[in-house]
């Protein structure tokens, strides 16, 4: 007995405007690139594309790191790759926690058998460099500092240059989450002296989800090569991945790369390079100012103090007496507009309006303000 074959229509997604915490709107050029013929992942033509992709990623990260490539997996896999390689059982790690993603970093440290030293800051605030300095003073043997540059759960941006400088002074490596910042606000891996960073394809890079750009400094590679214990994850072991992504010419099979999504990322990064990264940063800043002015006219208050705000993720409080879910449902159903709900401690209390990559346009800012005004009866 076999099961009856299910018969469905082809899936046709509705057209939405994506102004949440990611994914952001994907340009037609990227979607078209992904629809091109699949070829073998060891095909010389594909390898040529991969070399360009690494160069484009070095530009996005502003780094000369040779070990810069897209991990086959979402941002969370890029995060794990940094931790499983750089944290060995018994290693002390200073972890900054000021939102959901800092909490996930802490979870990673524990699962690697590391000894976490947690630096807590309130939700909605940047990481306090003085607290990080104090943590290193109390724990000079800490070998790694981990922090989130752009905390998407709250919309707060931390001073990555200051935090990385402290880690350097104490001889520690730095792991930075720049999933939401890459392509939206300055990420300067080499100038700041960051040793390991991971991002995501679906936020300010406006590619489809499922790829995680990462970059590792020579100091980070030395640390991995000097490990006493083997990396507990076979898939994420950098020593093995190096042969695949790092080896120019002599590539060997490690896993089958997600061919078509990589075409998409190549195109998304070409779009970023055509605009120029400084121009992309300026666009996010300018349109954030326009959105902010409009939200304030509607009487909506920001969660994060002005000096610590991320332009590409605007967290605002749900007004007293307004039903969070009902508003978001109306925006989606009547306006085809997606905005984000609050996460964790902010569930039901906060909306998160993304202005990421291709979705960060003057037209979208006007449309979002108009839609919110109508739904809230404040237009
Ligand atoms: C989105 C996000 C992640 C996780 O990325 P996924 O692609 O969803 O796994 C990690 N950190 C931050 C700051 C993010 O915004």
Image (tube, rainbow, N blue to C red):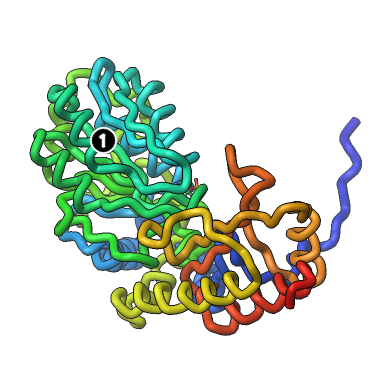
- Residue 114: percent from the left, percent from the top? 30, 21
- Is residue 318 shown above or below 170? below
Density class for disc 1 (Cα within 10 Å; few <14, some 14-19, many ≥20) is: some
Quadrant location of the N terminus in the rendered image? top right
The percent coordinates of residue 80 (x first, y second) are 39, 36
Q: Check mark 1 vs ligand 1: CB closer than 8 Å? yes or no.
A: no
Q: Going 74% across and 59% down the picture, which residue do you hit?
A: 328
Residue located at (76% from left, 60% from top) = 327
Above/below status of 79 relative to 271:
above
Which residue is at 46% across, 54% downward? 304
Residue at x-position 18% and y-position 35% = 133
Looking at the rendering, which quadrant does residue 306 occupy?
Answer: bottom left
Q: Which of 365 and 64 is in front in this view?
A: 365
Residue identifier under label 1: 131
User: Which of the 4 image quadrants contains residue 54?
Assistant: bottom left
Foreground residue among 43 and 292? 292
| Total marks placed | 1
Question: Is residue 12 something one can see in this rendering?
Answer: no
Tag 1, which secondary structure? helix
Provide residue 186's location: percent of width, then percent of height.
29, 65
Decide if residue 27 is on the left or right side of residue 262.
Answer: right
Above or below, 173 relative to 210: above
Residue 33 image offset from top left, x and y in percent: 50, 73
Would residue 18 be found to the left or right of residue 87 on screen? right
Whether residue 25 is situated above or below residue 198 in the rendered picture: below
**Residue 189 visible within the image:** yes
48 relative to 286 in the view: left or right: left
- Quadrant (top left, top right, bottom left, bottom right) of the C terminus: bottom right
């Amino acid at each position: 007995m076999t099961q009856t074959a299910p018969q469905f229509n082809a899936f046709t997604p509705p057209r939405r405007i994506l102004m949440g915490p990611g994914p952001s709107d994907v340009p037609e050029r990227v979607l078209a690139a992904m629809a091109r013929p699949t070829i073998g992942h060891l095909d010389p033509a594909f390898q040529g594309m991969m070399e360009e992709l690494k160069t484009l990623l070095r530009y996005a990260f502003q780094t000369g790191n040779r070990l810069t490539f897209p991990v086959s997996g979402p941002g969370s896999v890029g995060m794990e790759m940094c931790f499983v390689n750089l944290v060995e059982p018994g290693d002390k790690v200073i972890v900054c926690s000021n939102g959901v993603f800092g909490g996930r970093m802490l979870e990673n440290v524990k699962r690697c058998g590391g000894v976490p030293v947690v630096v807590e800051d309130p939700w909605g605030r940047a990481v306090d460099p003085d607290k990080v300095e104090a943590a290193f003073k109390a724990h000079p043997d800490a070998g790694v500092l981990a922090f989130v540059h752009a905390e998407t759960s709250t919309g707060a941006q931390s001073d990555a240059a200051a935090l990385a400088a402290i880690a350097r002074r104490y001889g520690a490596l730095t792991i930075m989450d720049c999933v939401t910042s890459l392509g939206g606000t300055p990420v300067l891996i080499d100038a700041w002296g960051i040793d390991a960073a991971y991002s995501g394809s679906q936020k300010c890079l406006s590619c489809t989800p499922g790829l995680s750009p990462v970059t590792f400094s020579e100091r980070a590679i030395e640390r991995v090569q000097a490990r006493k214990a083997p990396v507990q994850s076979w898939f994420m072991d950098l020593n093995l991945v190096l042969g695949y992504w790092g080896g120019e010419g002599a590539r060997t099979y490690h896993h089958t790369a997600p061919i078509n999504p990589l075409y998409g990322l190549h195109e998304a990064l070409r779009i970023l390079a055509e605009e120029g990264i400084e121009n992309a940063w300026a666009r996010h800043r300018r349109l954030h100012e326009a959105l902010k002015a409009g939200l304030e006219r509607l009487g909506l208050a920001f969660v994060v103090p002005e000096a610590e705000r991320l332009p590409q993720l605007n967290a605002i409080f749900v007004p007293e007496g307004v039903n969070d879910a009902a508003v978001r449902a109306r925006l989606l159903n009547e306006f085809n507009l997606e905005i984000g709900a609050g996460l964790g401690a902010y569930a039901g209390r906060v909306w998160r309006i993304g202005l990421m990559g291709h979705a960060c346009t003057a037209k979208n800012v006007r449309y979002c303000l108009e839609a919110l005004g109508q739904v809230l009866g404040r237009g």
